[in-house]
Image (cartoon, rainbow, N blue to C red):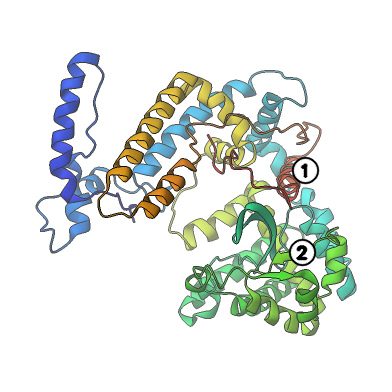
């Protein structure tokens, strides 16, 4: 399905006026002017009262048929494709050079070359993850399982629930530790709980069997792993909040004392886990979905240890599948992209590699990108424009007749507190602690990247919120 374009027919008249103004400007600048709304994107043969969506978007949809490698396509995808091609050119150029270890150019070059080196990855197969699989197989008690969970979560994983640091919803100036319900491989809990999704579950089980065998397990063991994985997943999914329940902000923020939380949920050895995470000094945290943790605490002591281990085996192999040999990558694509999303064709390897770099070295790439495509002068122009907009809005608020004096003061105070972020950060992210090395395997370097992001996130615990931080790539 094509992505909905946010066009409103009522704006058409305004777009015509806007285009006329632009044409006047065109005579002065000789630059190509693109209208704010292109009327050719509409399909006026459709009556708006019958199908407003196609009335507004029909022309664009006809001109942009869905491509085999996409599950959706819209104007934001057009922009994303354009920027990816630009980044591809930058990365290709960096990959040709030779750089000193420890520099961002070196990190980008090494990771990109490893990401596109299918020969080496096919040669290694599942070898890069065998140490983690063996560590799971060696678990011989529930205490050892809790230790493993703490160890993995310290590396940035999420074994049975999610943990992270972010702004306190009750005090947005400070960061707080958060516990969240588990992440589900299929996303929404309804995939597991609604009988109409039985065929998807069947395909998921076949996929887990397939990658387990690729990882070296026998057909019999792979069937056991898949069976236990879905059994544990079903239980966890039943505990999870639905997408609708997760939208309830108040229900999903539960700041509690750690001691009280531990006392209220005795079935999981939280004290052991907290010590393993080195969080003994933590006095309070956000318990997130409290109902999930109450159910989890009652269930965990009764769950079969082998089934829990098989669940972790399946999640680990699945989590790494896209970074191993081509047969793993193909298996993951066949299920997640084709079966779940209807995508018929895999994106080219360079694109997948660039997307990976965006996820691991986004600001390092962004620093090079903006020098070429968004220089400082462009940023300055936009900052001036925003400043003018703020001044104009402040003037309008001051002159409003329907707003009381106190309300005007609060509105102007809110306006003055806006943090303006244009193009790229004033201070770039420091990657000096990210140890990417050509001596490591691709998976080892990815582990380093995950560890780096985890450590960076945990370093903000108990610290004031850094409002200058960027939460998206430049």
Instruction: Name the mark on residue 332.
Output: none
Observer-nearest residue: 203 or 471?
471
Q: Is residue 219 visible?
A: no
Residue 236 spot, x, y in % from top left: 65, 76
The answer to whether residue 285 is above or below residue 116 is below
The answer to whether residue 432 is above or below residue 30 is below
What residue is shown with label 1? 444
Classify mark 1: residues with Cα within 10 Å, few (<14), some (14-19) or many (20+): some
Q: Disc 2 on helix, strand or loop?
A: loop
In the figure, residue 468 lies in which quadrant? Answer: top right
What distance separates the C-alpha of mark 1 from that of mark 2?
Answer: 22 Å
Quadrant of the frame with the N terminus: bottom left
Residue 233 spot, x, y in % from top left: 64, 74
What residue is shown with label 2? 217
Residue 48 spot, x, y in % from top left: 13, 58
The answer to whether residue 4 is above or below residue 365 is below
Residue 311 spot, x, y in % from top left: 72, 70
Observer-nearest residue: 169 or 379?
169
- In this rendering, the count of numbered labels is 2
Dot placed on the residue nearer the N-terminal end, 1 or 2: 2
Q: Residue at x 72, y 60 (%)?
A: 316
In the figure, residue 456 lies in which quadrant? Answer: top right
Q: Residue at x 33, y 49 (%)?
A: 66
In the figure, residue 290 lies in which quadrant? Answer: bottom right
Observer-nearest residue: 437 or 120?
437
Q: Is residue 39 left or right of residue 172?
A: left
Q: Is residue 362 left or right of residue 123?
A: left
Q: Residue at x 75, y 34 (%)?
A: 436
Q: Is residue 438 left or right of residue 7?
A: right
Q: Name the residue furthest front.
A: 405
Observer-nearest residue: 312 or 142?
142
């Amino acid at each position: 399905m094509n992505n909905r374009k946010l066009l409103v027919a009522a704006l058409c008249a305004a777009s015509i006026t806007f285009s006329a103004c632009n044409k006047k400007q065109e005579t002065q600048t000789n630059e190509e002017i693109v209208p704010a709304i292109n009327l050719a994107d509409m399909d006026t043969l459709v009556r708006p009262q019958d199908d407003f969506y196609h009335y507004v978007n029909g022309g664009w949809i006809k001109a942009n048929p869905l491509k085999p490698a996409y599950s959706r396509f819209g104007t934001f995808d057009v922009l994303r494709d354009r920027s990816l091609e630009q980044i591809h050119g930058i990365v290709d150029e960096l990959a040709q050079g030779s750089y000193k270890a420890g520099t961002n150019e070196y990190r980008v070059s090494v990771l990109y070359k490893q990401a596109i080196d299918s020969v080496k990855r096919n040669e290694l197969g599942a070898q890069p993850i065998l140490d983690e699989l063996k560590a799971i197989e060696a678990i011989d008690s529930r205490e050892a399982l809790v230790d493993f969970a703490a160890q993995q979560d310290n590396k940035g994983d999420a074994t049975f629930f999610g943990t992270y640091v972010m702004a306190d919803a009750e005090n947005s100036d400070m960061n707080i530790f958060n516990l969240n319900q588990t992440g589900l491989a299929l996303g929404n809990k309804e995939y597991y709980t609604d009988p109409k999704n039985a065929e998807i579950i069947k395909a998921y089980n076949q996929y887990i069997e397939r990658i387990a065998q690729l990882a070296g397990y026998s057909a019999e063991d792979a069937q056991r792993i898949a069976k236990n994985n879905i059994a544990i997943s079903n239980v966890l999914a039943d505990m999870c909040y639905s997408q609708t329940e997760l939208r309830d902000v108040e229900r999903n923020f539960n700041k509690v004392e750690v001691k009280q939380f531990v006392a209220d949920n005795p079935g999981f050895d939280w004290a052991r886990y907290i010590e393993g995470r080195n969080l003994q000094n933590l006095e309070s945290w956000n318990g997130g979905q409290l109902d999930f943790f109450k159910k989890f605490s009652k269930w965990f002591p009764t769950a079969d240890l082998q089934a829990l281990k098989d669940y972790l085996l399946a999640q680990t192999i699945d989590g790494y599948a896209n970074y191993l040999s081509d047969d793993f990558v193909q298996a993951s694509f066949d299920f997640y992209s084709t079966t779940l999303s209807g995508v018929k064709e895999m994106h080219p390897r360079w694109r997948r590699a660039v997307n990976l770099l965006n996820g691991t070295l986004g600001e390092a790439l962004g620093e090079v990108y903006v020098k070429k495509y968004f220089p400082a002068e462009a940023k300055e122009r936009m900052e001036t424009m925003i400043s003018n907009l703020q001044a104009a809005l402040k003037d309008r608020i001051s002159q409003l007749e329907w707003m009381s004096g106190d309300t005007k003061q609060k509105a102007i105070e809110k306006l003055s507190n806006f943090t303006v972020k244009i193009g790229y950060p004033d201070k770039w992210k420091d990657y000096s602690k990210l140890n990417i090395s050509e001596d490591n395997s691709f998976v080892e370097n990815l582990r380093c990247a995950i560890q780096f992001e985890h450590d960076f996130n945990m370093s903000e615990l108990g610290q004031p919120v850094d409002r200058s931080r960027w939460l998206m790539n430049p």
